[in-house]
Image: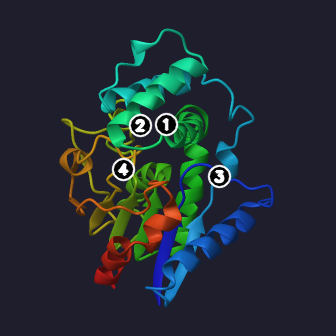
Amino acid sequence: MTRILGVHGVRNYKAADTTPALGAERLRTDWQGALSGALPALDLETAYYADLLRSERQGAEPDEAEVALIEQWALAWGVAPDGVQGRATGWLRWICGEVARRSGQRPAVVEKTVSLFFPEVARYFTARREAVRERVREALLRHRPEIVLAHSLGSVVAYEALHDLAGESGLDVRLLVTLGSPLALPHAVFHRLRPAPLDGLGTRPGPVRRWVDIADVGDFVAVPKGELARVFTGVEPLPDISIAPVWPHGVLDYLRHPGVTGAVLAAL
């Protein structure tokens, strides 16, 4: 039975997740359900860290760290973030409206995604990076997966954790699949990675034999479009796909897509 480890993205904390083990089991059930139609024989676990990034500030006006990330994300979409003065709700709404116009998405969907995504990304980089990485390292060493599926911010955590374990653990990951990944986002993510990119290039982690990147054509988190395979060595991009027209960043829609299940089946 193939061992798979899932590494989740943002906004995965639920009130019932009173322990990391309960949170991991809840996510495992959801991911297993999404994959089981095409991949029934799986030994699936999930690495859970959502409790470490939970913040009472979520839903508040963006703080300085979040503003810095949002500005870089806007620039990646070709939107000058100083188009509206100030750092209040109107500023964020204007940026999201401009990105929505460029991506063909509804402004409310883009605004909701940004409000959920950047607070946890900022918290990861400024306060909880080592604690989150340790959770994922522990899961990798415990489960010793043959395949790692990493979504959104989880692709950043998995990338760093797998690099941490290079040459020390005997870990052998046949396939890393990144889904809706922001790894290539300049300055906000790419230039903050550990290990830092060398001469403008990141590298496939040592324990990983093959790395496939998959992003919905309308996924406004996975930007700049087409850049990930250019700024990381050893990445195979799949052709543009469409997982869901209304919410093009949802992990369960990614997991159900034939492009994802096909990549996993090819590694079995």
> Residue at 29% across / 27% down in the picture?
78
**Is residue 11 found left or right of 67 in the rendered image?**
right
> Residue at 41% across / 58% down in the picture?
162
Image quadrant assignment for residue 63: top right
Element marked by disc 3? helix
Counting residues from the start of the chain, the first of labels 3 and 2 encountered is 3
Counting residues from the start of the chain, the first of labels 2 and 1 encountered is 2
**Is residue 131 found left or right of 265 in the rendered image?**
right
Counting residues from the start of the chain, the first of labels 2 and 4 encountered is 2
Tell me which amino acid carries mark 3: Ala
Assign the C terminus to one quadrant of the image: bottom left
> Residue at 60% across / 34% down in the picture?
127
Q: Are marks 3 and 2 in contact (CB under 8 Å)?
A: no
Tell me which amino acid carries mark 4: Gly
Q: On the image, numbered disc 2 is attached to which residue?
A: 100
Q: Is residue 146 above or below residue 268?
A: above
Q: On the image, numbered disc 1 is attached to which residue?
A: 107
The answer for how far apart the CA atoms under marks 3 and 2 are is: 27 Å
Q: Nearer the viewer, mark 4 or mark 3?
A: 4
Q: Local crowd at mark 2 within 10 Å, few (<14), some, or many (≥20)?
A: many
The answer for how far apart the CA atoms under marks 1 and 3 are is: 26 Å
Q: On the image, numbered disc 4 is attached to which residue?
A: 218
Q: Are marks 2 and 1 in contact (CB under 8 Å)?
A: yes
Q: Local crowd at mark 4 within 10 Å, few (<14), some, or many (≥20)?
A: many
